[in-house]
Image (cartoon, rainbow, N blue to C red):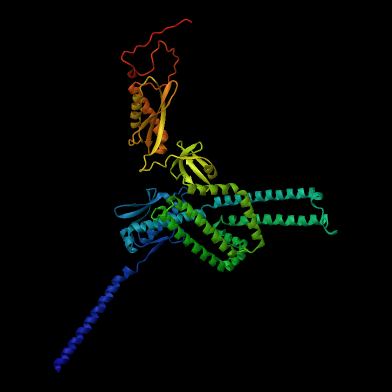
Amino acid sequence: MKKKLLCFLVFFITLFSSLVFAQKDSVQLSKTAVPELVQKKYPVAPFRDTLFYVYNKVGSFSAESRADAIAGKIRKLYEDSFFKEDSISVVPSDISQDIMYKNDFVIMSILEIDAKAENQTAAYIAKRNLSLIKKAIIYQNENYSMLPKRLGYTALLILIISIVLYFVGKAFNRVKLHILKNSDKYFKGFNYNNIKILSPQKQQSLLMQLYSFVKGITLVLIVYLSLPILFSIFPATEAYTTTLLRWILTPAKLAVMGFVDFLPSLVTIVVIVFIFKYTIKVIRFFFDEIKKENIKIDGFYSDWAMPTFNIVRFLLLAFMVVIIFPYLPGSDSPIFKGVSVFVGILFSLGSSNAIANMVAGLVITYMRPFKIGDFIKIGDVSGEVIEKTALVTRIRTPKFEDITIPNATVLSSTSTNYSSNTKQVNNGLLIHSTVSIGYDVPWAAIHKALIEAALKTEMVEKTPQPFVLQTSLDDFYVSYQINVYTKHPTQQPLIYSSLHQNIQDSFNAAGIEIMSPHYNAVRDGNNTTIPENYLKDDYEAPSFNIKKQ
């Protein structure tokens, strides 16, 4: 029994000792932790509002001294009349991030110990403080350092308002003077069935009252609408700007209430538009697949896809407008209907040429005479097709001149497409040039020189080979036509130029003169023009004889 009691006493003493020491440790820990958790901070407030805080001292400078010094430097920048906000930057150093002005005036330095106080990096603190300093100085400059300018703007605005009021008043006075001078012409009274309703004097009096009312309202509105601009110049009165605008915009509440009443119809319109929008998207996807030739329909070409889609879309949109029309506000109004009829008549009378061009554009689309990128000739205009619209076709000439041709003119003219046979499966476009050479030069030599010149020309197909046609046997010379294939129709001017250069070189190398001779010959006693290889070996030119008659 004594042993049990002794053991229980030892256990109790041990437990009590552990609790006492644990409490001391916790008290000691809390005493050492208090300075870490509760740290005094000093605000940097150069313009009354706090920009940021300083937590730590540096060397002999306490945190409070640092905060005051930084605030003083910021105020010094604010007092600088030539302050430039872009000249403030963060310059890193070995031990700190320095915020400097013009690289020679240190505003403040952020150490690692400052960053740890806010659980951030020194770079982040420097960037943040830089932004806050800039904003504070700019705000002070805009709101407190522009007093002379604001006063100048105020005086200028008052002067402008005075000038406007003066000239408006003068204009009204001239109108009044004109009316009074021609009162006998304008005021003849108002009679109805021999009943005098208004005498000329009364009619003039009513008009003058209306004149005075309009003049007064106009001048008041000019002044009233100028007040918000005037009040917005000074920050202290800027709040009145909203108040004045609110007063004049109060009548707009009626329109807002009308819009609220229109909301059910608006929801219906939105649903209709939503349905048609996605219907058009589905149709567009179908025509896009046709354009990409993923879907093929016999007799329907891929380049018809988008024009056909545009027609279908136009019809769907027109049908959508017809459905939406009854839900529009004021659609039942006689005035609205009258305006619609009037606009329709104007459109019908004034758009005859436009409609003709649109129909022609539609016909051209399904005729497929050319595509964008083709090199064509319409009338006297040759060039590359750069745009096809519902109304016009635009062509860019080799001289980079953009020419617009109405579709009605395109439809009524003959068009030549130089690009239609330039695909890989075809031989290409056949271009040609003609030279005329005298009968004394063998045709075989000329053929050879022309073909050699053609083969040396760039952008000319080597297969099929160029060939020569003798197009005419004229009185003094033979016309030789060199024909070459090319798959670069847009480069025709360059190809022709290169071909002509090579023809000159080939003929010069072969000793053939490019000329068209004209003969004045007395046949008896003159050499024949037949090439020598066609003459007999013993051929001699006859002597020249003159016989008397």
Position of residue 546 relative to residue 9, above or below, is above
Position of residue 259 relative to residue 402, above or below, is below
- Left or right of 105: which side holds 279? right
Between 520 and 530, which is closer to the camera in this rendering? 530
Q: Quadrant of residue 243?
A: bottom right
Q: Quadrant of the N terminus?
A: bottom left
- Left or right of 545: which side holds 190? right
Residue beneath the point at 37% across and 36% down = 485
Percent across and percent down for residue 388 are 48, 46
Percent across and percent down for residue 434 are 42, 28
Residue beneath the point at 54% across and 52% down = 147
Can residue 28 be seen here?
yes
Q: Residue furthest top?
A: 548
Position of residue 333 relative to residue 525, above or below, is below
Percent across and percent down for residue 455 are 33, 32
Q: How many labels does the image show?
A: 0
Between 18 and 505, which is closer to the camera in this rendering? 505
Position of residue 172 relative to residue 404, above or below, is below
Can residue 239 be seen here?
no
Q: Residue furthest right?
A: 194
- Left or right of 112: which side holds 219? right
Residue beneath the point at 65% across and 48% down = 163
Q: Which residue lies furthest to the left in this view?
A: 3
Between 100 and 17, which is closer to the camera in this rendering? 100
Q: Residue furthest bottom?
A: 1
Q: In which quarter of the image is residue 471?
A: top left
Percent across and percent down for residue 441 are 36, 21
